[in-house]
Amino acid sequence: MFPCAFTPRSRASTSIGLAALLLAFAGQAAEPPRFPKPNPEQALAELKVFSPDGSPVRMPVEDWDGARRRVTSDPAWQRWLTEQRGEVDDWMARRQDRVEWVTGWWHDFVSPQDGSFLTWTPDEPGEETLSSPSDPRVKLTPKLHAAWVFGFRTRHAAKLAEAAQLFRLTGERRYADWTSSQLDFYATNYLRWPEKPGRGCRLMWQSLDEAVNLVRFVHAVRLLDDAVPVAQRQRWFGQFFRPQAEMLETTFQRVHNIACWHRSAVGHVALCFADDALWQKAVEAPFGIRQQLARGVTSDYLWFEQSLGYNSYVVSALRPFFEYAQMAGRGAKLRQEMAVLENLLLAPILLRFPTGQLPNPADSTGGPGRAPNVASLAASYRLFPTPLGLTEAVRRRDWNTLLDPAVPPASLPPLPAVPSRNLESSRMALLRRGDWQVFFHYGQLDASHAQAEALDYEVFLGDTPISHDPGTVGYGSPLHATYFTQGLAHNVPLVNGLGQAPWQPGELLGFDADRGYVAARQSRYRANASAERELHLDERSLIVVTRLALQADAGPAALGLALHFQGRVLGLEDFQPGEPFAASHWPAGFRYWREPRTASFTDRAALRVDCGDRRLEVLIEVPGGFRVSHALTPDVPPRQRESLYVETTGTAAVFRTTFRELTTQGAAVEGRR
């Protein structure tokens, strides 16, 4: 029955109305999924370990009796336990949260000089005690103190869970008593922390961090189990856990990486306190876990916000929930979702460059990631056993391997080759030929975490990076908003120095793996401009053709592109120093380009680039007159790199850039006007 509330005017109108309603529901049900993922358990099968029943998903084990035997009989485990006890004992003796502490944003815990993250220490910072590896003295400000509090509360919640684990292992009541006292503190004072309007949090600066800590608090309660009186446990639920879960459900009712943490946290509370209403919200609601994975994971098993770091981040959000659900006997109906999540963990392996470095689309911090991510694979072996994860987990001593020892795989197969392929549902493509490998990012799927980087490309020549995307710095740094997220920081077309705005999915114009060819178009690259780019690989060269065109009613503009190199640009003797970007109309990001030098050319310019053991000729062809400027520019902090800005003036322009490997000394700079 469909619930209906209407008064029929006649039998005929009732039949027509009901038929229309049934047709509407049928049409809705028949609508194809945005990202079809047929048979996810068999996808990426060469990277998985399957159980006898054919499932790649495993039932996690918590063997406390076996853990006690291991720490009693094995000297290595005894040493490990001594270290764990020492760290937790020290924290219990010396650290206490305070109601008056205000939590800030972790992304504000950065150097004002270069955006690098500061070094966190457990002691409350003084005026002159903050520093980063590249900035030795940073003045304490209220914003930085609040960001430090984030680090404290995050670690404090983790220590509660660790103390509860020590209680279960050793039986020492002092660990249970301390954990209980801390949960009492939070339950008593939780409502004294003001809710941050529209942000769904009290303890933390943003709801994401509230959710992450809530999972840790649930873990502590679960491990204390019947060591806590029922009345005390219910008080925690009523005054601390349920209010947090209900508050988290007021925000991020959409598909998003943070929403995955919200639903995971609420699901943990539902399992711990047997609350079916919270379970429905966490799993079955329109933006519950099922829909997050159905609509947030592309057919290529990449997270739709595109930063590859979010693949492992979403796994870290949802994997603990699935482990808990499995142990609680509720995993069978989540088998499809668990299979999709495992593929999210594994899919970046098929995007890696020869060194294991990953492409870096969207606004991830800390520089490019790496694949395989053995740390994430090892952390996941209890639910998602893989040869790579098991091999690494066997070498580790942690709570996972103590409670559920990893069994080494029968063999460690080689990693699958990275092929040329078009990842259309993810708006990306890979080209590979000879020693060349190119990643092409031709559009976005959502505004969340998008940068002005459509039509960007990254290049490796064998093991040598030629040009990579640095990602961004801490979001609280001015460099994030004014430079790293802007077009100038990427290998993209530029109109008056500006890249793409707003985000667009783009249009794939062609892809041919055998020819080493891909082309895409952004018809609304900017409000008044379109852009196209095609890339072609042969055995010795990468050729990039870029077309920019303004609308018919637009006047001439500075049309150009940026080129970034992980090496030295040679042959700049005749480039003249100056400030070509000083004019007021240039974007603010140009102020981070240091020691600029400029030369003018007609039709073509040939430069050399020395990238370690590989030397390239870079031939830039633009009909008529154009300028090339060279500068030192920000890379992953604190590193710098060398960059070129190529510019002509008009209403349309075509740029042809050829990267050709040199086996002998390259020619001198050509075509100077």
Image (tube, rainbow, N blue to C red):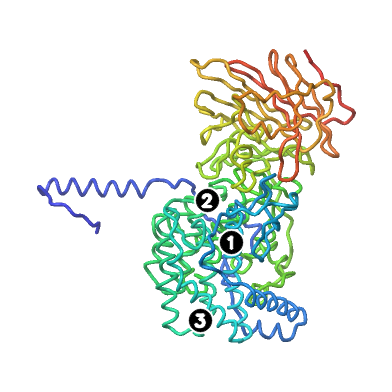
Residue bearing mark 1: 149
Q: Say left or right for 393 vs 52.
A: right
Q: Secondary structure at mark 1?
A: helix
| Of residues 593 and 343, the one drawn nearer to the viewer in this rendering | 593
Q: Which residue is the extreme one toward the left?
A: 10
Q: Say left or right for 140 vs 326.
A: right
Q: Which residue is the extreme one toward the front?
A: 127
Could you classify mark 1 by the number of other residues whose Cα lies within 10 Å: few (under 14), some (14-19), or many (20 or more)?
many
Q: Residue at x 61, y 69 (%)?
A: 382
Residue 314 in the image: state x and y as whole percent: 55, 56
Residue bearing mark 2: 297
Q: Quadrant of the N terminus?
A: bottom left
| Of residues 469 and 541, the one drawn nearer to the viewer in this rendering | 469
Mark 2 is on which residue type?
A: Val
Mark 3 or mark 2: which comes first in sequence? 3
Q: Residue at x 64, y 61 (%)?
A: 48
Q: Secondary structure at mark 3?
A: helix
Residue bearing mark 3: 225
**Residue 240 figure quarter:** bottom left
**Residue 639 figure quarter:** top right
Q: Quadrant of the C terminus?
A: top right
> Marks 1/2: CA distance?
33 Å
Count of all numbered marks drawn on residues in the image: 3
Q: Residue at x 62, y 32 (%)?
A: 588
Could you classify mark 3 by the number of other residues whose Cα lies within 10 Å: few (under 14), some (14-19), or many (20 or more)?
some
